[in-house]
Image (cartoon, grey):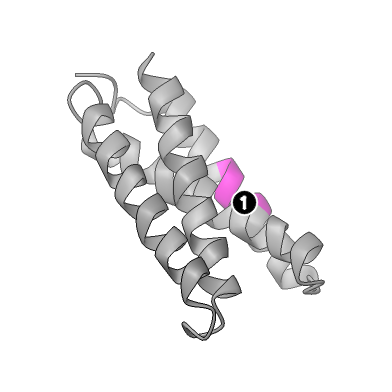
Amino acid sequence: MTYLLLAAAVITEVCATLLLKASNGWEKWEYGMGSIFFYSLSGLVFAFVLKSMNVGLAYAIWSGVGIALVCIASVFIWQQRFDTAAISGVVLIFAGTLLITVKSSMTMQ
C-alpha cells in the first residue's frame, strides 16, 4: 500500500510540474492553479508515505522517478530533444533509484 501511495505522490507531482510549465510563467493562470492543487495533493499523499517508509528511501524514489518522468514527458508534450548526456542521466536516475530500492538497507520503518 505504501508503494502505491508513493506512486500516487510521484504522479501528482509530475502533473503539477507539467502544469507549471504549461502556465507559461502564470500567463495561463488556470494551469498555475492546477499546479498548486497537484503540488498540494502530492505533498499530502507523500506525508502519508512517510508514516511507514524511511524518508531517505521515499525521497530518493519520489524525486528520482519524478525527474525522469518529467524529462520523458517533456519530449512528448513539448518536443524537447534528448542528447546522449540527458538520456544517460535519466538511465542513471532509474538505476540509482532501483539500486536504493532493491539493495539498500534503508527499508520500511
Position of 91 compared to 99: left or right?
Answer: right
Which image quarter holds the C terminus?
top left
Residue placed farthest to the front in the image?
30
Q: Is 36 rendered above or below residue 7?
A: below
Q: Residue at x 40, y 31 (%)?
A: 6
Q: Is 87 rendered above or below residue 101?
A: below
Position of 81 compared to 100: left or right?
Answer: right
Q: Residue at x 48, y 24 (%)?
A: 102
- Please report the bounds of the magenta region as a residue range: 91-95
- Given residues 91 and 22, the one toward you in this image is 22
Q: Residue at x 26, y 40 (%)?
A: 44
Spot occupied by residue 103 in the image (x, y as percentages of width and height): 44, 25
- Inspect the image, locate mark 1, and give the three-letter code of the amino acid beneath it: Leu
Spot occupied by residue 25 in the image (x, y as percentages of width and height): 49, 85
Q: Residue at x 23, y 28 (%)?
A: 48
Residue highlighted by disc 1: 69
Residue 46: which quarter of the image?
top left
